[in-house]
Image (cartoon, helix red, strand yellow):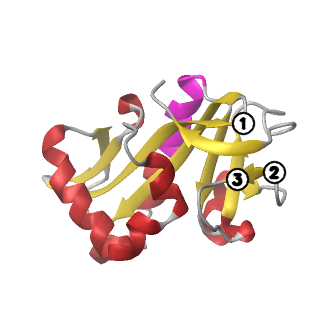
């Protein structure tokens, strides 16, 4: 089996990624809090990655710059999508690891996401203390996770999450 090649997302990749997100998250994805944060805000272009097996796009990951209260050194991971037919092969893990490595290089100190601890815990994500970070709309507190790319960044971060162009 060919190895996954990771590259920056291009305009031509957008329709395929849109379909993968639709297959992965369904039509209700636009009502979710994380999508509402990203609404109308362009993701960080240097952190929009795609995964390829030969000529086939099998996954992608994006990061959006966010403010949490007064903190502007944060990003929101998502969506992370993998072709449902290709799940379980480590492609999502490879995209996440590369994306987090690049986010650290870009100077982000904190990455936030809404996701499953059993999956994202392997990258070092931890649950956010309840009531500290507020997203638009309801979020299961057990699914609001953060990863400090710079130790100590989460300490003292409190407030509403808002996407912005960096």
Image height of 11 relative to 91, above or below: above
Residue at figure coordinates x 35%, y 42% from the top left: 49
Quadrant location, the N terminus? bottom left
Q: In the structure shown, which secondary structural element does the residue marked by tag 2 occupy?
A: loop
Front residue of this view, candidates 157 and 6: 157
Residue 131 horizontal side relative to residue 68, left or right: right
Q: CA distance from mark 3 to mark 1?
A: 9 Å
Write the start and end of the magenta stretch as one range. 97-107
- The chief SS type of the magenta part is helix
Quick check: marks 3 and 1 in contact, CB under 8 Å?
no
Residue 26, visible in the rendered structure: no
Indicate yes or no whether the magenta region holds residue 54: no
Q: In the structure shown, which secondary structural element does the residue marked by tag 1 occupy?
A: loop
The local crowd at label 1, few if under 14, some if 14 to 19, many if 20 or more residues have their Cα within 10 Å, is some
Residue where numbered disc 1 is placed: 69
Residue where numbered disc 3 is placed: 134
Residue 48, visible in the rendered structure: yes
Task: Give the numbered dot on residue 132.
Answer: 2
């Amino acid at each position: 089996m060919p190895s996954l090649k990771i590259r920056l997302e291009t305009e031509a990749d957008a329709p395929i990624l849109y379909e993968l997100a639709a297959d992965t998250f369904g039509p209700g994805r636009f009502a979710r809090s994380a999508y509402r944060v990203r609404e109308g805000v362009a993701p960080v272009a240097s952190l929009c990655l795609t995964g390829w097996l030969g000529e086939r796009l099998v996954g992608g990951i994006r990061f959006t710059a966010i403010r949490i209260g007064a903190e502007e050194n944060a990003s929101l991971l998502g969506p992370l999508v993998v072709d449902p037919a290709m799940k379980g092969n480590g492609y999502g893990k490879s995209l996440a690891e590369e994306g987090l490595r690049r986010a650290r290089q870009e100077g982000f100190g904190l990455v936030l996401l809404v996701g499953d601890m059993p999956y994202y815990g392997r990258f070092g994500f931890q649950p956010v203390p309840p009531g500290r970070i507020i997203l638009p709309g309801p979020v299961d507190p057990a699914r609001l996770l953060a990863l400090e790319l710079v130790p100590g960044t989460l300490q003292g971060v409190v407030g509403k999450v808002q996407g912005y162009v960096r």
